[in-house]
Image: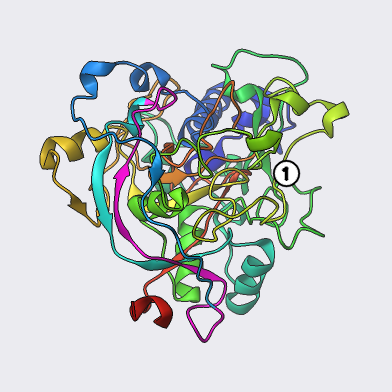
């Protein structure tokens, strides 16, 4: 909920406040909104740290040429043979991270990892599936609740004053875009905290998910996802499991589908298409206005039968986020294979330029979203990673889950 209370986003973006507040409170809420933008991993806000270093930092020679680990076998559960609508991910050893020229500092260095086999949702969890969960449990999501100071203050400097009670209103962060090019350093120009935004109203109270049952559910926090997982009898993937699955059997390929960004000129993921939509984050009415999610499965599946592993909506993983985690893994394990890593014990995100604390809680998000583009985000790659405040729902963040269950008989008998 941390960033959710940033009414300031409304001030910064010109939205009307539900009630006037003092200048000190307004400044606080602006800062809180900025924290949300940083935590959401929308762009390269941490570029100064991520981009420093070069060949000397890539000291572990683990990179192999892009290729196929093993020919994947697509196995989708039908409820009898495996969990329904989940793909069997056989597990194995792979090279995690990337030393590619497009890779950011937090993706390096590559290191050997081994994961056990598991089942993974073939698609993002959809609006229809989340509606079923809410109907069965009566669950109220983070965005629908009044923000709590206890959740907020862990994201802020210790001397930050507590906002007045009437400034704490339910809502969430929404991409609104701009009408002209802007400085990429000012994320508040294209994001706004919108009271009344939630999973049923992703862009605000006047929006709807009618007709979008098969779109990814968004505006869900890490806490919301954990609640859904408990109800579904599943769990969030670790960061290592997610990346192994996203690669679809391709070792160190730049994209989930291979090396070519647009094979045969065809788009392979729902991202911000600069050739059609123009410069990010300008919302071009001629290109259809503000971009958003697409129906799951619009684009081809990867080698394991998973769709939209990159693009469409970011996906929560179970790990705490440290920007330097891969460095620490190599320092501890060297070139040895790391079995089933579950992430660090704490968070560290070095970009505190907009008010966020470097050690504030962050959970990993993976896969990029409909906002990622070649000019600004580039997170539609299997190795790309960001951290987000666990209590921060956003209009481009969703999830899919995994399940520990026996492998398909056809594979187990081999």
In percent of width and height, residue 179 lies at 78, 20
Q: Give the left or right position of residue 67, taking residue 376 as reference.
A: left
In percent of width and height, residue 176 lies at 71, 32
Q: Is residue 4 above or below residue 32?
A: below
* Residue 217 painted magenta: no
Q: Residue 191 occupies which quadrant of the picture?
A: top right
Q: Residue at x 66, y 26 (%)?
A: 190
Q: Nearer the viewer, residue 270 or 202?
A: 270
Residue sitting at the far right: 286
Q: Residue at x 51, y 59 (%)?
A: 400
Q: Can the viewer see residue 175 in this picture?
A: no
Residue sitting at the far bottom: 80
- Crowdedness of circle 1 by 10 Å Cα count: few (<14), some, many (20+)? many
Q: Nearer the viewer, residue 191 or 379?
A: 379
| Residue position marked by numbered label 1 in the rendering | 203
Q: Residue at x 63, y 36 (%)?
A: 263
Q: Can the viewer see residue 368 in this picture?
A: yes
In percent of width and height, residue 238 lies at 35, 55
Q: Residue at x 33, y 76 (%)?
A: 414
In percent of width and height, residue 343 lies at 27, 49
Residue extent of the magenta highlight: 78-104
Q: Nearer the viewer, residue 376 or 101?
A: 101
């Amino acid at each position: 909920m941390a960033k959710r209370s940033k009414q300031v986003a409304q001030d910064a973006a010109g939205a009307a406040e539900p009630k006037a507040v003092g200048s000190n409170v307004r400044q606080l809420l602006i800062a809180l909104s900025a924290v949300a933008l940083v935590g959401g991993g929308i762009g390269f806000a941490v570029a100064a740290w991520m981009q420093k270093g070069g060949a000397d930092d890539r000291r572990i020679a683990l990179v192999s040429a892009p290729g196929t680990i093993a020919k994947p076998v697509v196995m989708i559960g039908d409820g009898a043979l495996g969990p329904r609508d989940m793909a069997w991910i056989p597990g194995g050893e792979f090279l995690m991270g990337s030393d590619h020229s497009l890779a950011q500092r937090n993706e390096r260095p590559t290191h050997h990892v081994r994961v056990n086999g598991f089942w993974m949702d073939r698609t993002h969890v959809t609006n229809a599936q989340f509606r079923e969960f809410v109907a069965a449990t009566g669950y109220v999501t983070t965005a629908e609740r009044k923000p709590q100071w206890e959740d907020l203050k862990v994201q802020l400097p210790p001397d930050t004053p507590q906002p007045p009670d009437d400034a704490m209103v339910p809502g969430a962060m929404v991409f609104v875009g701009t009408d002209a090019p802007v400085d990429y350093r000012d994320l508040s120009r294209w994001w706004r905290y919108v009271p009344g935004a939630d999973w049923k109203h992703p862009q605000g109270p006047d929006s709807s998910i009618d007709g979008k049952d098969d779109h990814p559910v968004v505006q869900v926090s890490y806490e919301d996802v954990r609640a859904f997982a408990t109800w579904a009898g599943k769990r969030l993937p670790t960061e290592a499991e997610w990346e192994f699955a996203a690669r679809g059997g391709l070792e160190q390929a730049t994209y989930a589908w291979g090396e070519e960004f647009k094979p045969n000129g065809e788009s392979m993921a729902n991202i911000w298409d600069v050739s059609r939509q123009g410069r990010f984050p300008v919302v071009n009415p001629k290109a259809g206005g503000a971009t958003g999610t697409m129906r799951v499965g619009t684009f081809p599946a990867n080698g394991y039968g998973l769709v939209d592993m990159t693009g469409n909506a970011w996906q929560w993983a179970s790990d705490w986020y440290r920007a330097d985690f891969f460095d620490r893994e190599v320092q501890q394990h060297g070139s040895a294979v790391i079995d089933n890593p579950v992430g660090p014990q704490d968070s560290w995100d070095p970009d505190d330029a907009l008010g966020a604390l470097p050690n504030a809680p962050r959970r990993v998000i993976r896969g990029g979203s409909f906002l990622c583009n070649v000019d600004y985000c580039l997170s539609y790659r299997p190795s790309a990673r960001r951290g987000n405040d666990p209590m921060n729902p956003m209009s481009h963040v969703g999830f899919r889950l995994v399940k520990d269950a026996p492998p398909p008989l056809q594979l187990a008998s081999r």
